[in-house]
């Protein structure tokens, strides 16, 4: 499958938090999808992650250069209990929107795991028949998961991604590069990208990124740490220098201080 999304190293910009978390993640600037799409375009991201509502209204199939990754399921934070993220958009709609890949969240360990496996199977089949890569957000969660950042639970989730046919899996990082090496190994030929999480000190993010890449992950799918940062293009440049040019953390930090 020839696709930019499947490059050896990637940096995806995630902007599905409006559904997953609600507008509490946003300020006056980044509540506007145009602001975030502009960061992806100027920062030359490998992909931008939208739900279909935002893609339909803001992503211009002809003008925008950033490959679209369409998230096909989602849920809110309002409902409590074991999570289930239903399908909200079809592969056909994704193709119409000119998506270059589709995304789907699975919560391994949830009492609804079987339903998500079934939905994922349909999506994976149809996407692959149409040469679209599939990215699975593998987030172990639910009453039976005591610690979602446990090495074995993360490695099991990574392996599930491989078993189910995901091309890329998106995982949380437990801040342990040795654990991540095992998790990446468990994923086999399925590539691993790491999500950003809540906004942290940029130097911490750069250090984590260096460790993540050294452990064998192919990049990041990051949201809040970019579009909540005061100068998103500077942090983008710094991250890209580590991901694509193998620069050191100290070299990358320089980009935070330089003019653009
Ligand atoms: P962030 O980098 O902002 O954490 O985004 C990554 C992401 O996976 C989003 O795609 C998604 O909206 C969110 O995190 C879900 O995180 P959680 O389920 O932990 O709230």
Image (cartoon, helix red, strand yellow):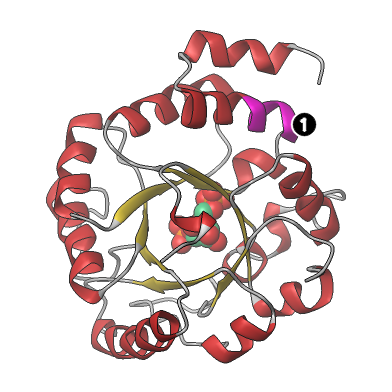
Q: Quadrant of residue 174?
A: top left
Look at the image and say whether residue 235 sits in the magenta stretch.
yes
The residue sitting at 25% across, 71% down in the picture is 108
Q: What quarter of the picture does the N terminus occupy? A: bottom left
Query: Foreground: 178 or 245?
Result: 245
- Give the answer, above or below, for where 85 lies relative to 235: below
Give the residue at mark 1.
Answer: 230
Q: Is residue 29 left or right of residue 19?
A: right
Query: Foreground: 27 or 156?
Result: 156
Picture coordinates of residue 85, whole percent (x, y)? 44, 80
What range of the chain is rendered magenta? 232-237
Q: Residue furthest front?
A: 2
Picture coordinates of residue 8, whole percent (x, y)? 40, 44
Task: Give SS at disc 1.
Answer: loop
Q: Is residue 225 left or right of residue 10?
A: right
- Give the answer, above or below, for where 30 lies relative to 167: above
Magenta segment main secondary structure? helix
Look at the image and say whether residue 1 sits in the magenta stretch.
no
């Amino acid at each position: 499958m020839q696709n930019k999304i499947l490059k050896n190293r990637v940096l995806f910009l995630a902007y599905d938090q409006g559904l997953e978390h609600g507008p509490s993640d946003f300020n006056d600037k980044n509540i506007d999808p145009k602001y975030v799409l502009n960061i992806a375009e100027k920062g030359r991201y490998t992909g931008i992650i939208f739900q279909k509502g935002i893609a339909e209204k803001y992503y211009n199939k002809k003008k925008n250069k950033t490959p679209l990754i369409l998230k096909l399921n989602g849920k809110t934070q309002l409902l409590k209990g074991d999570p289930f993220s239903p399908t909200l958009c079809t592969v056909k709609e994704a193709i119409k929107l000119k998506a270059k890949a589709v995304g789907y969240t699975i919560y391994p360990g949830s009492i609804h795991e079987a339903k998500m496996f079934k939905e994922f199977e349909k999506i994976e089949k149809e996407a692959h028949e149409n040469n679209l890569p599939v990215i699975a957000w593998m987030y172990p969660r639910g009453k039976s998961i005591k610690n979602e950042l446990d090495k074995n639970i993360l490695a099991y989730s990574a392996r599930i991604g491989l078993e189910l046919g995901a091309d890329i899996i998106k995982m949380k990082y437990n801040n342990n590069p040795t654990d991540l090496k095992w998790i990446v190994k468990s994923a086999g030929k399925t590539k691993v990208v790491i999500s950003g999480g809540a906004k942290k000190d940029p130097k911490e993010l750069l250090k984590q990124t260096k460790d993540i890449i050294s452990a064998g992950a192919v990049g990041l799918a990051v949201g809040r740490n970019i579009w909540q940062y005061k100068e998103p293009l500077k942090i983008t440049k710094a991250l890209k220098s580590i991901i694509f040019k193998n620069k050191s953390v100290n070299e990358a930090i320089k980009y935070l201080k330089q003019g653009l």
